[in-house]
Image (spheres, rainbow, N blue to C red):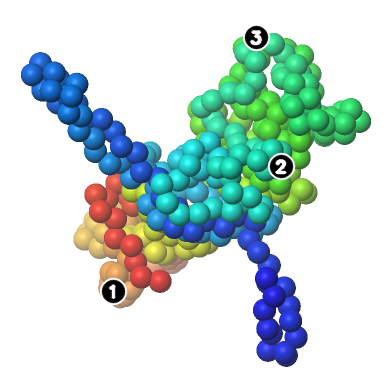
């Protein structure tokens, strides 16, 4: 889009690769009444209730970004990814991905993105993964030489060269997820939607998937939207997060700012000079760890300065540090709130 700059020269404004504006999706769910008479009446006069899976969601993502999409179960994350993948249509609002409207399901669009979920599989269960890869090759019309080169590259990065000839049902959960990612990336999509890719994986498998995604995204500059309940995934891979709760966006910005905006407490760690932890230190906050001469306290954010002043005046302290609570604790507390308070920007 041409815009007039300060110098008077006409420049081109960079368009986002994903542009979502006021996107909403409402389902009407049949409300079944209890009792035989009520069930009989329901045959003729059905009652429905509206379920707002996504409400007025807006965000923009630039090419090459890896963005976390966070929210509790039922917040609307998966529904949003389905909308952006063209699997369902919105009730209202708009979305443009790479210049395409997703729910038009144009072939040109479907060849440029991939959707990977941690709970649904795209590989044939009883066949080796390489047979599913060959099917993807035909579906996306990948040239033979390109296919071989991409397969060698991806299996090498994932360290599964010796497993692709093994039936999928014989692979571990972590190995199957790596095969799913290979299948999703064989046609070199420009946009990748990842819905809980590490769900159920052990720590080692999680780290392998994280390392692969970090390396591949940096090399290919692919645009990624990642949903995950594992905050280690988010901290390892994403600088920006879009947080959604009850179908609405409540945060869109750096991951590092989530604690500042929503964290109600901070962690204060003190090391006492005499080697002992005073018994009355618990008056200043919740004791998380007491391992003389160190103690870790959880203190309400607004009380940290006053509490530190009082403790430093009262005790002989060798060292003190103040830090945010772990991201997973802040997120869990935020989503547990019945009506989360959204701070003003």
Label 3 and label 2: CA atoms lie apart by 31 Å
Identified at 26% across, 59% down, the residue is 285
Work out whether residue 190 can be spotted: yes
Q: Residue at label 3?
A: 126
Identified at 17% across, 28% down, the residue is 45
Q: Position of residue 57 (x, y in %)?
A: 43, 55
Above/below status of 310 relative to 249? below
Q: Work out whether mark 3 precedes mark 1 in sequence or the reverse, and give the earlier one.
A: 3
Q: Position of residue 254 (x, y in %)?
A: 52, 61
Q: Quadrant of residue 19?
A: bottom right
What is the residue that sits farthest to the right in this orientation?
Answer: 145
Q: Residue at label 2?
A: 108
User: Badge 1 local density, few (<14 within 10 Å), some, or many (20+)?
Assistant: few
Label 2 and label 1: CA atoms lie apart by 60 Å
* Disc assigned to residue 306: 1
| Left or right: where 55 falls relative to 62 | left
Q: Work out whether mark 3 precedes mark 2 in sequence or the reverse, and give the earlier one.
A: 2
User: Badge 3 local density, few (<14 within 10 Å), some, or many (20+)?
Assistant: few
- Image quadrant occupied by the N terminus: bottom right
Pick the front one: 263 or 97 = 97
Q: Work out whether mark 2 precedes mark 1 in sequence or the reverse, and give the earlier one.
A: 2
Above/below status of 144 relative to 257? above
Pick the front one: 281 or 331 = 331
Q: Nearer the viewer, mark 3 or mark 2?
A: 2
Label 2, secondary structure: give it. Answer: helix
Q: Position of residue 65 (x, y in %)?
A: 64, 55
Q: Position of residue 247 (x, y in %)?
A: 37, 49
Label 1, secondary structure: give it. Answer: helix
User: Badge 2 local density, few (<14 within 10 Å), some, or many (20+)?
Assistant: few
């Amino acid at each position: 889009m041409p815009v007039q700059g300060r110098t008077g020269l006409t420049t081109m404004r960079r368009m986002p690769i994903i542009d979502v504006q006021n996107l909403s999706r409402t389902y009407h769910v049949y409300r079944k009444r209890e009792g035989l008479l009520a069930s009989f009446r329901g045959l003729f006069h059905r009652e429905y209730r509206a379920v707002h899976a996504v409400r007025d969601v807006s965000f923009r993502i630039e090419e090459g970004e890896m963005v976390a999409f966070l929210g509790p179960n039922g917040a609307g994350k998966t529904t949003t990814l389905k909308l952006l993948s063209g699997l369902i249509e919105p009730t209202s609002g708009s979305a443009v991905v790479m210049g395409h409207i997703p729910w038009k399901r144009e072939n040109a669009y479907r060849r440029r993105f991939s959707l990977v979920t941690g709970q649904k599989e795209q590989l044939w269960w009883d066949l080796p993964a390489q047979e599913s890869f060959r099917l993807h090759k035909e579906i996306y019309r990948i040239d033979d030489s390109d296919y071989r080169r991409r397969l060698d590259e991806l299996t090498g990065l994932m360290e599964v060269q010796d497993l692709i000839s093994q039936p999928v049902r014989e692979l571990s959960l972590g190995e199957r997820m790596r095969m799913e990612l290979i299948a999703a990336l064989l046609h070199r999509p420009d946009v990748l939607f990842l819905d809980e890719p590490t769900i159920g994986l052990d720590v080692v498998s999680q780290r392998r998937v994280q390392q692969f995604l970090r390396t591949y995204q940096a090399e290919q500059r692919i645009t990624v939207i990642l949903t995950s309940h594992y905050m280690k995934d988010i901290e390892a891979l994403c600088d920006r997060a879009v947080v959604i709760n009850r179908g609405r966006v409540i945060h869109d910005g750096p991951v590092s700012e989530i604690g500042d905006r929503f964290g109600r407490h901070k962690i204060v760690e003190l090391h006492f000079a005499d080697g002992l932890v005073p018994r009355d230190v618990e008056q200043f906050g919740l004791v998380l760890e007491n391992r003389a001469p160190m103690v870790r306290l959880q203190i309400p954010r607004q009380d940290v300065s006053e509490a530190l002043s009082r403790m430093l005046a009262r005790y002989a302290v060798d060292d003190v540090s103040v830090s945010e609570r772990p991201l997973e604790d802040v997120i869990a507390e935020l989503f547990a709130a019945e009506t989360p308070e959204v701070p003003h920007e």
